[in-house]
Image (spheres, rainbow, N blue to C red):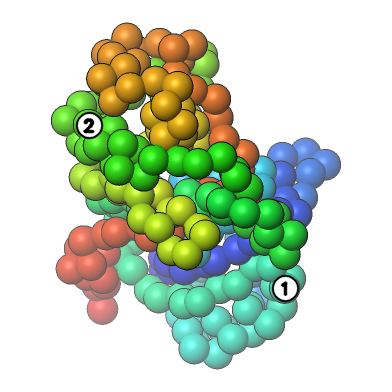
Amino acid sequence: MRYFLEISFDGSNYHGWQKQPKSQTIQQTIEDCISILLKDKINIVSAGRTDSGVHAKEMIAHFDYKNKLDLIGFTHRLDSFLPHDISVNKIFQVSHESHARFSAISRLYEYHISQKKTPLLHKRVFQFKNHLDINLMNKAAKILCKHQDFESFSKSNSDVKTFNCNIMNARWESNNDILIFSIKADRFLRNMVRAVVGTLIEVGIGKITVDDFEKIILKKNRKFAGYSVPACGLYLCKIEYNLKEILNVRK
């Protein structure tokens, strides 16, 4: 039987999602807890991989288990057993063909920037006190939806078959002293959101123009884009699925 986990976490104290030798990761921590509770070796597969220091309001992962679970009871037991900075919000059974990564139809990320010094949030926002022109940044962000090849924002030497992504929405909003950039796409390249934000910041401070931003996309070369902003401000927020398909569980 296959189960989906809906997880949230503060990534500050972890070396990213994916298991690594001699490093504490989100995946390893969750696998260990599930394996202990079920008294069986459990492997989980996620919808994506977050880097060290990146957070998640919603990460989806799946695992297989031979027996039917008491979903409410096991969710409570697992959530109580996990460390304070990882929470499992929901567990539900899905069809065996459903896959946390390959069945996903979209992902939504946010990037949070504080416009003032915020000591209590220093691991959860990027503190950037220079003035940013949000109107110009939104004009540039709209351009992202017109293109598909984002090699300019991909980590150098990435081993991928394609740099194409279908960006459905990208915009900045201001919430008091916090600027929030949200971007939704069918897929993302490694380090892509942080590179996009770093380049949009260059638009916001007047270092480059909106036209320059589009030219950077067309050059398809990472060296022309802006810097990669810190991981602490990045949040994986939502992963969408065709619920009718994934919940089509055979009785």
The residue under the point 83% across, 42% down is: 22
Instruction: Name the residue carrying label 2.
Output: 143
Question: What secondary structure is found at the residue carrying circle 2?
Answer: helix
Question: What secondary structure is found at the residue carrying circle 1?
Answer: loop
Task: Give residue 132's quadrant in the image.
Answer: top left
Q: Nearer the viewer, residue 169 or 90?
A: 169
Q: Position of residue 105 (x, y in %)?
A: 25, 50
Instruction: Name the residue carrying label 1.
Output: 84
Q: Nearer the viewer, residue 121 or 222?
A: 121
Q: Earlier in the sequence, mark 2 or mark 1?
A: 1
Which corner quadrant holds the N terminus? bottom left
Q: Position of residue 60 (x, y in %)?
A: 45, 60
Q: On screen, 65 above or below 11?
A: below
For disc 2, the neighbor class at 10 Å (few under 14, some 14 to 19, many from 20) is some
Is 27 positioned to the left or the right of 175 in the image?
Answer: right
The residue under the point 69% across, 68% down is: 85
Task: Give residue 217's quadrant in the image.
Answer: top left
Which corner quadrant holds the C terminus? bottom left
The residue under the point 59% across, 86% down is: 76
Amino acid type of the residue tagged 1 in the rendering? His
Q: Report the mark closest to the observer, 2 or 1.
A: 2
Q: How many marks?
A: 2
Q: CA distance from mark 2 to mark 1?
A: 40 Å
Q: Position of residue 84 (x, y in %)?
A: 72, 73
Q: On screen, 228 above or below 100?
A: above
Residue 19 in view here: no
